[in-house]
Each structure stands twice: as C-alpha cells, then as structure tokens.
Amino acid sequence: MGDLEYKISEDGKSIIIDAVDDAMDPVQDFISDKLEEYGCEKKPMFQIRLAVEEIFVNIISYAYSPEVGKAEIRCDVTENPLSVTIQFLDSGKPFDPLAKEDADTSGAMFMEQEGGFGIHLVKSTMDSVDYEYRDGKNVLTIKKNLA
C-alpha cells in the first residue's frame, strides 16, 4: 500500500482516505468488517461491495480529476430492522449521478452505451439511493436492508 494514508473516525463509523485506486481495498475492508459483525449474508454483502466499488471508482475518476482529493465513507449498521447506510462524501466537482436517465438495459444498444450502467446497478440492488450537494460536498447515500 505504500504511502496511502487514511484515518478511521473515533466512533469507528467512517474512514477518510485519498480517492485513489489503491484505496479500494481499505474502503471495502472497512465496510465488510462492519457488515460481518452483524452476520451479513453473502448475497447482500456482494451487492454492497459492487455498489461501493462503483461509487468509489466514480469519485476516483471524476470528483477531483486530474488532482487527488479525500473521500469520506461512513458506514452505519442499525439493528431494528437490520440495515446498512453508507454515505460517500467528497469535496470534488458537484455531480449528481442520479440526475442522468437510467441506462436502457433492454437490448444491444445497452452494450454500446457509455456510462449510466454502474449507477443503474447501484439503484437496482440497493433499497434507496440519494444524492445531495451540501456544505460544498457531494453526499451520496445508499441503504440496504439486510433482514
């Protein structure tokens, strides 16, 4: 991992890390560790990992490009009912991935389209996906019911 620096918050609910490719594993491990504490099953764990990868890659690719900036990922698991809420915060260029029309996944054109599929995947596997631009930050929130 070299000189990749990151910080876990005092309450253990967030990680602040450089938005770079090398940060993907620590981000995924941070979230997986939280979910494993609550006995998250394989299918939702897989769906969450895919969603996290898609969103974090978008932050890496677009938020600060060509510069590098920080991203904060908050992970909060609640028990009644069992669910996880993950927030992605960055101070990069304002961008609402939900504003784009859903990708048309119905035919051959789907394979030729550029963009849109990743957020479609996130929206179709998570129970809610919300975006807001608040206090100079992009805030994308995903929620998945685990029970």
Image (tube, grey):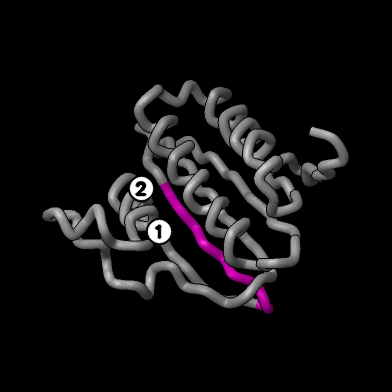
Q: Amino acid at mark 1?
A: Val
Residue identified by numbered label 1: 129
Compared to 16, does 36 lie above or below? above
The picture places residue 12, in percent across and down from the top left corner, at 73, 40
Quadrant location of the C terminus in the rendered image: top left
Quadrant location of the N terminus in the rendered image: top right
Label 1–label 2 contact, CB within 8 A: yes
Q: Amino acid at mark 2?
A: Met
Left or right of 66: which side holds 61?
left
Observer able to see residue 10: no
Left or right of 113: which side holds 82?
right
Check disc 1: other Cα within 10 Å, few if <14, some if 14-19, many if 20+: some
Left or right of 137: which side holds 53?
left
Residue identified by numbered label 2: 126
Is label 2 in a helix, a strand or a loop? loop
The outermost residue toward the front is: 112
Residue visible at 58% across and 59% down? 61
Left or right of 59: which side holds 136?
right
Q: Provide the residue span drawn in magenta.
A: 135-143
Compared to 75, does 97 lie above or below? below
Secondary structure, magenta segment, majority class: strand
The picture places residue 14, in percent across and down from the top left corner, at 69, 47
Marks counted in the figure total 2
- Residue 60, quarter of the rendered image: bottom right
118 part of magenta stretch = no
The picture places residue 25, in percent across and down from the top left corner, at 64, 34
Closer to the camera in the image, 110 or 88: 110
Observer able to see residue 4: yes
Residue visible at 63% across and 61% down? 89
Closer to the camera in the image, 27 or 12: 27
- Residue 99, quarter of the rendered image: bottom left
Closer to the camera in the image, 55 or 35: 55
